[in-house]
Image (tube, rainbow, N blue to C red):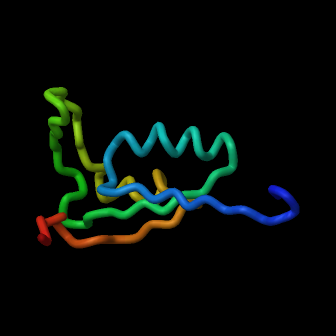
């Protein structure tokens, strides 16, 4: 409650990356629920991102791990392969 009104925040994360595992541990600790948008055709694939000259792993979770990793959270999909839709 905030000033007598119920408030809500929505958390949504994309791509089903292995970093989600740590994120979910933190959210579970505090009872926070999230929506995770997965790209089903990319599950299990390794990847890397470069942002402002820094590289970061962008490995996708394995298909057989989805149910256990995202247990008690919402799972959605947004495209099979995450194409550039511009």
Q: Horizontal placement of 39 versus 69: left or right? A: left
* Quadrant the N terminus occupies: bottom right
Q: Please tell me in which quadrant of the rendered image residue 5 appears.
A: bottom right
Residue furthest front as drawn: 3
Q: Horizontal placement of 17 versus 31: left or right? A: left
The residue drawn where x is 30% and y is 56% is 15
* Quadrant the C terminus occupies: bottom left
Total labels: the figure holds 0
The residue drawn where x is 23% and y is 72% is 79
The residue drawn where x is 33% and y is 71% is 77
Q: Please tell me in which quadrant of the rendered image residue 8 appears.
A: bottom right
Name the spot of residue 84 as percent of width and height, x first: 12, 65
In front of the other: 3 or 74: 3
In front of the other: 3 or 43: 3
The residue drawn where x is 26% and y is 64% is 39
Q: Is residue 39 above or below residue 68?
A: below
Name the spot of residue 12 as percent of width and height, x first: 45, 59
Name the spot of residue 50 as percent of width and height, x first: 15, 36
Residue furthest top as drawn: 54
């Amino acid at each position: 409650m905030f000033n007598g009104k119920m408030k809500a925040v929505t958390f949504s994360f994309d791509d089903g990356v292995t970093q989600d595992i740590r994120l979910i541990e933190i959210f579970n600790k505090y009872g926070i629920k999230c929506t995770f948008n997965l790209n089903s055709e990319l599950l299990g694939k390794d990847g890397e991102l470069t942002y402002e000259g820094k590289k970061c792993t962008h490995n996708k979770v394995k298909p057989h791990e989805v149910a256990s990793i995202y247990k008690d959270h919402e799972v959605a999909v947004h495209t099979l392969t995450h194409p550039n839709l511009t």
